[in-house]
Each structure stands twice: as C-alpha cells, then as structure tokens.
Image: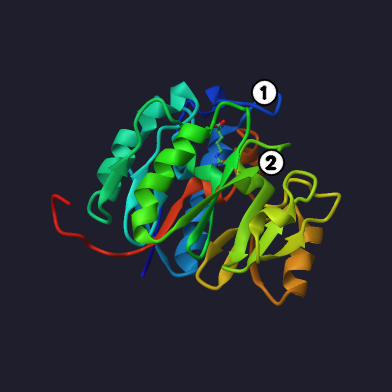
Amino acid sequence: MIIAMTRAVGPALACCELTHLAREPIDVARAVAQHESYERLLVSLGARVVRAAAAPDLPDAVFIEDTAVVLDEIAVITRPGAESRRAETAAVAEALAPHRPLRTMTAPGTLDGGDVLQLGRTLYVGLTAKGRTDAAGIEQLEAFVAPHGYAVVAVPFSGCLHLKSAASALADDLVLLNPDWVSAASFRGARAVTVDPDEPCAANALRIGDALVHPAQYPRTRARLEGESLRVAPLAYDELAKAEGALTCCSLIFEARQIAAGR
Ligand code: CIR
C-alpha cells in the first residue's frame, strides 16, 4: 500500500515564500479545491492519503515535501532553508514517526526535500545559491543514508526554486527535465525526456504506482510522456503554482510500513 502524506492548504498561503515569481493574488479557496482534487486523484491511483496536522499559521505548510525525505528504511526530517518554514517540521515528524525510524537534521546545514530526486539507490540533491539546500545539509543527508546503501550526488541547477522543478523521476532510469535548468549528464546512467521548449515549468511530474500526475496546463510535454508509453494523469494545479509549488511538493509518497515504537 502506498501512503501519500499531505497537509492542508492554510488560510495564510498568500504570505508564502517567493524566490523566482512576482507576488500575485492567490485565490485560497481555489487552491484548497485544487488540493482536494489532488488528494482524490492520488486515492484513485491507489494511494492512502494521510494528512499531517494542519498548520494554519504557516503559509507554506502545504508543501510538505520540503520537510522530509522518506526512504524505505528511514525518514530524514529536514532543516528547511527558509527560516519561516522551519516550524513546519515538528508535526511532520510526529506524523511520520509511526511509519519510519526518524533521523533529524540539525543546524547549521539546510536542505529542502524538493531538492532531493531519488533514482533507485541514488539521491540526486540540488544545490543552488538560493539559500535552500546547502553543502552542509547535503553532507548530513549523506551521513544518514549512506549506512542504508544510498549514494548522494550534488547537482547544480538554475532557473527554478528546487531541483525537482527542473527534473523529476519518471522511472528509476528515466527523468523528465528542462535542459536549460539542469544538465541531463547530472543523472549518470538515466535517460532523459525533455520538456517542450514552450513549457519550461513542465518538468515536475509526480510518480505514483505506474502513473504520473502531471500539470494539465502542459499538453505538449504530456504528449512527449505519452509518446514514451507512460500513463499520465493530468491535473489542474495552477493556483498553488503561484506560490512556487509543484505537484511533488504537496505530498510525501512512501510504502506503508509500521515500525516498532521508540526506534
Ligand atoms: C517556498 O518558497 O518554500 C514555497 N513557497 C514553495 C515550496 C515549493 N516546494 C517544492 O518545490 N518542493
């Protein structure tokens, strides 16, 4: 059973962090409705949606992906780069504790889960000068995951907030990417599908079971994915995109596994 852990869109969403986009009005009710459609789609694709406790005072809490890296063996609770987002992690740790042994990052390193792209036993971690994931954060992540057989590779990228807006996993040996923002050579043996040049923001797909959730507003890139015989579930998600959120940002996807208390 696949679990999709999510967190409600909060009333303060319009006060979110922004790095690349200009602030524009956000229709919170529309964002809530799109987020609910997202959860329903994940259920229809076979996931069990589990919501972490709501955090109405934390504008970016809906972007739960940034607060943890969940692997089969452990979950790493991150230390997000944006100071305003650090208070998000406590409730996520509480929600993940029944599912995985936890490892918790500490100062001064920072890392956002949106920068971590997993292909099999390799974690590619985006590194920019934007104040999100830094080298000390990547080192901490590596120390937590190396004992479980994972390699960690730092990946330079540009043009967007997190690595997973520049590239995302379609399969363990296949990535979708925007070549202007990240080099296909960064992902070693993996093959790359590139976004349509008119759709630079289309590189974030959410892999769930054998399907890919992909933003409905990028039909040309969707055609490329379908041309690879991939099963694509399009979803309208443009309101949360105004907060620089993408599809992967709004869930933590992992196999259900109960663990013994206290680990
Ligand atoms: C932020 O700037 O942190 C939020 N407004 C958007 C976070 C999006 N998360 C992601 O791409 N993983």
Report the label total.
Answer: 2
Please provide percent x and percent y for residue 145.
38, 52
Q: Secondary structure at mark 1?
A: loop
Identity of the residue drawn at 27% across and 56% down: 99
Nearest to the eye among marks 2 and 1: give it: 2
Asked if one can make out residue 216 in the rendered structure from this viewpoint, the answer is: no
Q: Is residue 159 left or right of residue 30?
A: right
Q: Tag 1: residue type? A: Arg
Mark 2 = which residue?
Answer: 157
Q: Which of the two residues, 189 or 174, is positioned nearer the viewer here?
A: 189
Which residue reaches farthest left? 261
Picture disc at residue 23? 1
Q: Is residue 224 left or right of residue 152?
A: right
Identity of the residue drawn at 50% across and 25% down: 82
Q: Classify 84 as above or below 252.
A: above
Identity of the residue drawn at 78% across and 46% down: 200
Which residue reaches farthest right? 198
Q: Which of the two residues, 137 or 131, is positioned nearer the viewer here?
A: 137
Identity of the residue drawn at 63% across and 33% down: 128
Few, some or many residues within 10 Å of mark 1 (<14, 14–19, 20+): some
